[in-house]
Amino acid sequence: MIDRNRPAASGPTGEPGAAPGPAAKHAFVTLVTNGDYARGALALVRSIQLSGTSADIVVLHTQAVTEDELSAVQKLGARLIQVDLLPTSDAFNQRHARSKILLNAPFTKGRKPTFHTPLDNFAKLRLWQLVEYQRCIFIDADALVLKNIDQLFLYPQFSAAPNVYESLSDFHRLNSGVFVAEPSLETFSDMLRALDQPDVFWRRTDQTFLQSYFPNWHGLPGFFNMLQYVWFNMPELWDWSSIGVLHYQYEKPWETGHPRSQQLMPLIDLWHAYLSGENIPDIASLPNPVKPA
């Protein structure tokens, strides 16, 4: 892991050592694995800052993301840390390649963009290596924080909201777009051991793995990870004044003319406001979706 915001300290032998740790004990963390998600991270980081948090904001990114693509995020003051993909076996990587995921576990309820690379998702487990922090809130880069959610730092590991966006029957499944974790090198090592087992197939990559690894996960209210499909599938659950995190699962708001763009236009417009930092509305004053008669 390479911290691009802090120069490495030199040890007594002149070898690079640990850089000085951050002042904050808590951090918001996201993951960027390509230029598209760098755009998402820019809007996310700005939204976190506008929430008035006192926590650090950490952007984990892979070598596939260029300095130019991350420059705007860095200017906002986020801590950039370069990470490698996990050291998983060739067989594991082949089973979780995009083509294999789409063949063996196709997405039937929504459309994933072409830049979605399932194998990269597992890199978010590197959050557990951020042992300079006592507790972290992970948020996917395709999300916005709409109000201060620092209270989540008081929640235990592993806390996540249910994957509800079509019906309440999905309440038993978690969504890994937002979760609370306690960094630990011991936990990270154990995760790697549990992750890459012979013939294992995690059909929804990190999300399925985390639910298996933390079977007694703590449920967060859905408002801490409001999935965008709730807007048209379950409008009776939508309340702008209560939403802490808006998560653009499936289609992304920066995609031009995606199949759901007309249905989701109010949410897309909101994302672009956060991206530019201009004309961000009072969230509580926004009209909720029209409930079916």
Image: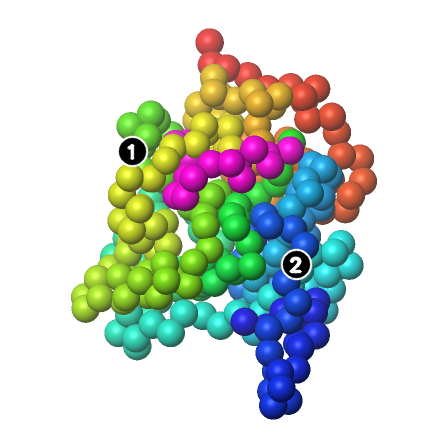
* Image coordinates for residue 108, horizontal then vertical, percent: 33, 44
Look at 66% across and 58% down and name the residue there: 22
SS at mark 1 in the image: helix
Identify the image quadrant of the N terminus: bottom right
Ranked by sequence position, the earlier of labels 2 and 1 is: 2
Viewer-side label of 2, 1: 2
Q: Residue 22 shows which numbered tag?
A: 2
Q: Residue furthest front?
A: 12
Pointer 1: residues within 10 angstroms few (<14), some, or many (20+)? Answer: few
Q: Which residues are magenta?
A: 148-165
* Image coordinates for residue 248, horizontal then vertical, percent: 53, 41
Picture quadrant where residue 13 is located: bottom right
Q: Are marks 2 and 1 in contact (CB under 8 Å)?
A: no
Image position of 214 (left or right of 7) = left
Query: Does residue 93 show up magenta in the picture?
Result: no
Picture quadrant where residue 7 is located: bottom right
> In this rendering, does residue 254 appear at all?
no
The one of 98 and 123 positioned closer to us in this rendering: 123
Q: Residue 172 shows which numbered tag?
A: 1
Q: Amino acid at mark 1?
A: His
Alpha-carbon span between mark 2 and mark 1: 36 Å
Say if 118 sits above or below 236 in the image.
below
Image position of 250 (left or right of 26) = left
Q: Amino acid at mark 2?
A: Pro
Q: Residue furthest bottom?
A: 13
Image position of 270 (left or right of 219) = right
Say if 121 sits above or below 252 in the image.
below
